Image (cartoon, rainbow, N blue to C red):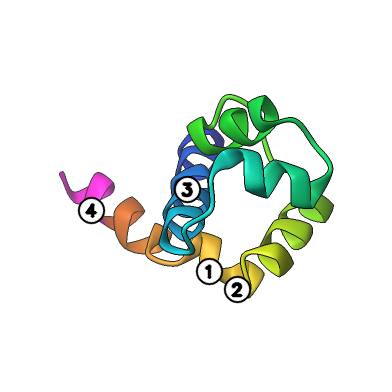
Amino acid sequence: VAKRVDDHVGERIRERRTMMGLTQEHLAKALDISYQQVQKYETGANRVSAGRLFEIAKRLEVDVAYFFESLAGKERRRKTA
């Protein structure tokens, strides 16, 4: 379950970043991290800490809850499938 949450959060980071017209490099620079780290967050390879997710939410101008939206629906569909 944790891996699926990490993957979902990463997908939502990527969706919002691209929606805002930002590259991984732009977001990385704003967060003072490498673009490779952003890439790892987006692919779910690395788990995003609560503090880092808060920073990402601020930079992407969304509430932290944005990254978890629709997750419950996905989990329900998996259980019934």
Identified at 71% across, 42% down, the residue is 28
Q: Position of residue 79 (x, y in %)?
A: 27, 47
Mark 4 vs mark 3: give the one in front. Answer: 3
Mark 1 vs mark 3: give the one in front. Answer: 3
**Looking at numbered disc 1 in the image, what kind of residue is underneath it?**
Tyr
Badge 2 crowding class, 10 Å Cα cut-off, few under 14, some 14 to 19, many 20 or more, is few
Dot 4 or dot 3: first in sequence order is: 3
Image: magenta residue range: 77-81
The residue singled out by tag 3 in the image is 14
Which disc, if any, is residue 62? 2
The residue singled out by tag 1 in the image is 66
**Looking at numbered disc 4 in the image, what kind of residue is underneath it?**
Arg
Helix, strand or loop at mark 1: helix
Q: Position of residue 60 (x, y in %)?
A: 62, 65
Dot 4 or dot 2: first in sequence order is: 2
Helix, strand or loop at mark 2: loop
Badge 4 crowding class, 10 Å Cα cut-off, few under 14, some 14 to 19, many 20 or more, is few
Mark 4 in CB contact with mark 3 (< 8 angstroms): no
Which disc, if any, is residue 77? 4
Q: Would residue 74 be counted in the magenta stretch?
A: no
Identified at 70% across, 57% down, the residue is 56
Mark 2 in CB contact with mark 1 (< 8 angstroms): yes
Rounded to the nearest whole Å, what is the CA distance between mark 1 and mark 3? 12 Å
**Looking at numbered disc 3 in the image, what kind of residue is underneath it?**
Arg
